[in-house]
Image (tube, rainbow, N blue to C red):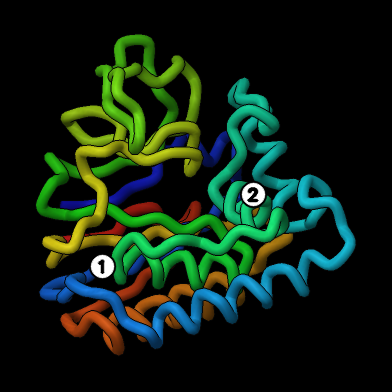
Amino acid sequence: MKLKISPEIFEQYPDVLLGVVALRGVDNRGEVDGISHLLREAEKSALEKIGGVPVAEHPNVVPWREAYRKFGAKPKDYPSSIENLIRRIDKGEQVRHINKLVDIYNVISLKHLLPVGGEDTDKIKSDVELTFAGNDEKTIYLLGEKEPRAPHPGEVIYKDDEGAICRRWNWKEADRTKLTEETTDAFMVLEALPPVRKEELEKATTELANLIKEFCGGEASTIILGKNNATAEIK
């Protein structure tokens, strides 16, 4: 299985970078106090970095709002995953426990102010592509939604042969490929747009892989994707 970025994406977003962590044989069961502690620390770190700046104006949030506008999504109605996380903790909420893998990628997302997501590789059909939605995309169930809906033509999605696995770039994931306690093989994606530099993304990607190996065991490999290296082997 491969993860690839379509050439059309680079036409609109030439500097986009993805940090990819491929996981095999992890143990995602149970809850670990050490991860909860890291999550609380990451929340504090994110709030310190935001400071008194309105969330919508922070340098790590602005590029995603602009990217969403390019494909016709209003950031106010469909915030990127990192904006959504920041707004929740800015209101005094704590990021709730889901499972170890999700908790760990939320740690990295908050600590580095980057969108991060993950999918269960065993639930993926065919290769995965970051691309623009076509006019005939299949309807899918998103996390927490009771009715299936199809992506809007032109929005950025991750998809396999069964349909979209994440809509509006990193806004909301499909229920079909979500990470659960039964997940043993998976892949994580960290996303960066300028002003985030490649070196920052590499650091966050490596840190994510190391935390997963520490708390979930298994094997983890990393790769950075961009215009000159747009495909990664996942499994």
Q: Relative to 153, does residue 85 appear above or below in the rendering? A: below
Residue 202 shows in this picture = no
Indicate the amino acid at tag 2: Glu
| In this rendering, position of residue 181 left or right of residue 164 | left
Which amino acid is tagged 1? Ala
The residue depicted at 62 percent of the width and 53 percent of the height is: 88
Query: Dot 1 surroundings within 10 Å: few (below 14), some, or many (20 or more)?
Result: many
Which residue occupies 37% across, 84% down?
A: 33
Q: CA distance from mark 2 to mark 1?
A: 25 Å
**Residue 160 on image: x %, y %:** 22, 36
Q: Secondary structure at mark 1?
A: strand
The quadrant the C terminus occupies is: bottom left
Looking at the image, can residue 139 be seen?
Answer: yes
Q: Is residue 80 left or right of residue 91?
A: left
The mark that comes first in sequence, 2 or 1, is: 1
Secondary structure beneath label 2:
helix
Residue 178 position, x and y percent, is 26, 48
Count numbered badges in the picture.
2
> Which label belongs to residue 83?
2
Of 21 and 43, nearer the camera is 43
**Residue at x-position 17% and y-position 54%:** 121
Image x and y of residue 107, in percent: 49, 72
Marks 1 and 2: in contact by CB < 8 Å?
no
Which numbered disc covers residue 167? none
Residue linked to disc 1: 22
Front residue of 80/23: it is 80
Asked where in the image residue 76 lies, by quadrant, the reply is top right
For residue 151, above or below residue 10 = above
Name the mark nearer the viewer: 2 or 1.
2
At x 27% / y 24%, what residue is drawn?
A: 140
Q: In the rendering, at what x and y percent does residue 15 appear?
A: 61, 52
162 in relation to 57, above or below: above
